Amino acid sequence: MNPLSERLSPPQNPDPSMWIDEAIWGHRLHDEQSPWLIYLEFLNVFMFEYSQGRAFSEAKGYNTLCYKPCKRLHLRNILFNNPKLENIRLVLANDSERWEAWFREMETAQGINNPDFRYLKKHFGRFEDFYQIVSIIRSTSLEMNSNKRWTSKFVFPYGEDCLFEDLHQNTNTNDRRFFGRTGEVLYLMLCRSRHSDELSGAIGDIMMQSGKWNNIVRCLQPDSPDAMRSERAKAFLPYKHHEAFDTLAKDWLSILRLNINPHDMIPHLVNLAGFHMVKYQLDVSRQLLERETPATVVCEIVAPKKTIVRELSCEHYQGNNSLPEQAVEYYLAGIKKADEWINAASEHDAFMKCLQVLEEKVLWPRNEGDYNGPNDPDSLMEDLRAAALKRHRRHNANIHRNYGREIGLVSKRGTNKLRYAPTDNFLKTLLLCNVPGRMALNHFLTRLSDRYGLILGEREAERILPREDFDKKAFQANSRRLEQRLASLGLLRRLSDGCAYIINPHRTGK
Amino acid sequence: MMQIEDWIRFLRKYGPIPRNDNMYDETIQRTARRYKIKPIEFKHPHQKKVIDSIISPDPVSIILTGTAGDGKTHLCRKVWGALKKDDLKGWASDDPYLNLKVLYPKDRETWPPPKERELRRVVTIHFIRDLSAWAPQDGYEWAPEKEKLLFRFCKALFDSSSDDVFLVAGNDGQLIETFERFKKRFEDIDLIQKALNAFEDLLVDDKQEKEGIRLRFFNLSRGNSSELFQLAVESFLNHDGWRGCLETNAGENEAFGPNCPIRRNFELLQTPLIHSRMTSLFELCDYNGLHVPLRQILLMLTNAILGHPDVKDRLMVPGDVPGIISAGTVSKASIYNNLFGGNLTEMRRNSITVFDYFDQFQIGYETTNRIDNILIFGEENELFSTPFKEFMTEDTFYGADEKFHAARRGYIEGTEENETATKDFMDLLISQRRGLFFKIPKASEAEFGLWKLTVFKYAGEYLDSFVDVLKSSGSVSRQIISRLVRGINRIFTGTLINNDREIFLATSGNYSQARICRILIDKISVYPSKGEKVQLKHDVLLKRVILSVYLTPDIFEDFDLNLIRYEFLSRVADEGVLPACFSRECYEDILAFKTRLLAAQKRRREAMREPPTPISELNILSLSDQGVAEENFVEVML
């Protein structure tokens, strides 16, 4: 693995209370933001920048992203804050009575000055049509089955008119609860990849040409829906380059070039975004820890009973899960070992000097009450360590588990321990972005291992695992189960013993 | 005359003995010489085509691939014999590579080759008769002469003036892997890559020939198991070895005497009903894309006759017979059970392809109330006594013997509290249900619900009213087509829709793969109308039925309607639920088909160049109480 490139310096007046997780991975990877919401936040950034003609360029320098997402409160009130709609349709039979009753009801719509929904009549001849459309759009919306606040429910991203930012219930502020900037980090990653130009065109295409459904969603909104957009800035990604950015971008491009309906691409893009975030977090940790190789991920294709592969998968999961925390400790130990700290600690007013070093390096302590301990460099450092780990464990440490589960890489199926046990959908995503037409199964397995460190078959296991962990039969059985699973999804042609081809049905003939 | 003992011992070698010696052509030939018995042989269905490719004025190379026991080496030997006028001396060597120099006409047209020397050319016929034995193992050195030979092969494939012809036999995985490894040794070898690509194309697309390459490619695993079965059973039963057995005047309780289960099984295997049921099972395997190699068929036949769970290797030899008769365990040698490997341990059975495939039918485990009532209560209850008498009492060999009656009474009266007794009776029932599968006459299939004794309730209809009708270019009944369409519509919409005259293409609005799809995109007429239609086609070579949905005469999509999918769609249509015993495979396949149809529908729309309208119209599906689709148009003015 290449060593990490030089870290970029933090922006002016950053929000976080200290700059450690942020310095290592960026501002920020947020565990409460599911990969779907990462994707949506990303689209908000991308479409704004695209509309300004500067998508995927950091023209003003690194980490200067500044964008204005939409709020679309008319649309959101109709879809997600409109409990009386059904009742009005049931109780009243006359079309104009229904409309009037509903308009009256909506006078209390939230976050809009003098709410007026009469523009809808321009688009819908009958209240019934309006009702049907609302129920269909709702049925495809995101977070509908969760108990999230109405301002954190989202329309499926059919096109640019469907995008808006997450808001606090008061509808005024983005409290960064579910749009926690991970989408911004994703944007910056792709921005700094080698394929940013191609990607910009490809994503722009699917968002701009998405046609009918986007138009219908637009009809639920007034002509100029968003007068009061606010500026969002201060996103931060610490590295100018990283292999993870390029691999992610390439995988996205492969999906975007598939011969399928653009809407069907989105779940795969979401899976890949989540997966590469996890990979990025683990690989950066390992680079920081000066390990020579990227993280390895032994995957169990779920077996009916306990196998050696399952045990190894659990172990790998646990090992990888602790990497980010180790990275934080190592980062702090690095500060303590550096000349700057040693010199400061040996000076006359050691405590004040050390305090300055920390204020500069980790932007801590900044507020009153951040540090109340004795005036002694060692206590100061110890306090920082405790505070940093506590903060890390609250959010950043959960990325691997939360994203891993959301995308279908990590699971407890059949056991009580978490491990890597990819679902069919996740396997399908990997297959679609790695198989050009067709590929022999063993080549596919090698590719997954070379590219992502995913270990499923016996050859890769033998190459990578220490000898005492390797069990040929167990891994052969694992790849046989994979073969069966892929065959049952219609993605594999088995020719005879030991000869199977993976088929990417959406690339064949291209 | 051949001794019974010798013949049965020889035959045993074809069976599921620990060392399945007869899996290899070489060993069979050797054993046959030792016992002085002719091996069981018949003309392989591909034999003529293979030989004709070589014995021709302009011969081309041949690749024979397939699973172990498909007859690759056997066919190589036949070619050698055809070239050497049946002189097999050279063939007996252990070398996996052999060659012959043969004279062919220079003009590549005159046949037989002219006598004049100057009008003839010398062609080297290379036999790589066992690729895996010939090619170096992964990680080992390649001998220079082997590299040269493989290069020559690649060259010969694309050079019409070549004087080299190759016959290569190996399983498909080995073939591809050998070339992959060979390719890795050289950089930028277009020729090897070109050959490799061609092999992959031929394999994946199930083709025998490809333009621009001098090669015939025979994938013996794509053969036709039911045809192989018929050939195999005929040569198996007509083998001289049996004549010797039949002509001995064996005593009552001796081998091949009147009470001998080997004899009984041999006789039963000749009955047309058993033949036709077995052929049906193989045919259904074919239509499910499951190929049974020839050697596995012989294994099954041998096991059918010799199987008995209580003897060595679970296969009888003549010496076992008197003991079995006196122990009263003749019924355990029942051919009905042996045909499914019922005499073997579960582990052994599962490791044998043919039994593994047959196991998917679950014959013996699937049943109906009527069938079990006949078996359990048939003797006393007059409602069921006629069939009980016909199938059980009159079958004095494998029907209701003392043991069965005792176990049955124990079960009915509930006197036997212990679990072993119940299990023993259940095992007997399994065996008897299997027996019924082979005893119910064709005419009574419907009456007894024969195919309900398998997992595929619609299998009989699939063969008789679907495949056979299409084979003879007839038209399938409307009732069946309607049922299939109803099944498709139910999966496509995720509702219990009953419409069956049109295919309903619906989406959820976002993903085409969503479970419930209420937005109707289009309907395609099943019966010909304005270029739209649904057509069933039969692919004779690959044995499959294709359902083609035409959107215009040029835009259509194909769906392979194998037995599992047919069963799945029929059950969805008739029972209204997704059958739990089927994997997700069918469901996913049908959704993938919908995705393809939606893409085709888009192509049609683009081809028609429909102008954009200022109105967006959605067609939302709902169902009436009778499950009939009601379409609600919703308009949005953009």
Image: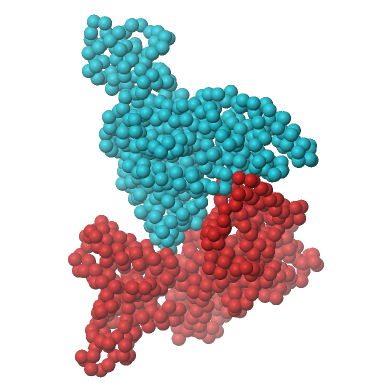
Residue drawn at x 28%, y 18% as measured from the top left? A336
Q: Residue furthest left?
A: B144
Which quadrant would the C terminus of chain B be assigned to in this image? top right
Extreme residue toward the right, this view: B382
> Looking at the image, which is closer to me, A448 or B189?
B189
In-image side of B611 versus A384 (left or right): right
Name the residue furthest bottom. Answer: B115
Colour setup of the view: by chain
Task: Give the image quarter of residue A290.
Answer: top left
Tell me what residue is drawn at x 72 percent, y 60 percent.
B369
Depth check: B616 or B142 in front? B616
State which quadrant residue A195 falls in.
top left
**Residue B562: where, in percent of width, then height?**
56, 65
The reply to whether residue B93 is visible in this rendering is: no
Q: Is residue A264 above or below residue B9?
A: above
User: Image height check: is A385 above or below B463?
Assistant: above
Whether residue A78 appears in this view of the structure is yes
- Count of marks overlaid on the render: 0
| In-front residue for pair B68/A5 | A5
Residue A264 position, x and y percent, is 51, 48
- Residue A255 falls left or right of residue B486: left
Colour seen for chain A: cyan
Q: Is residue B55 left or right of residue B264?
A: left
Q: Residue at x 50, y 65 (%)?
A: B290
Residue at 64% x, 75% y: name it. Answer: B475
Left or right: B611 in relation to A351: right
- The correct choice, above or below, for A234 with respect to A56 in the image is above
Residue B1: x and y in percent read 45, 86
Shown in red, the chain is B
x and y percentages locating residue B336 in the rendered image:
60, 69
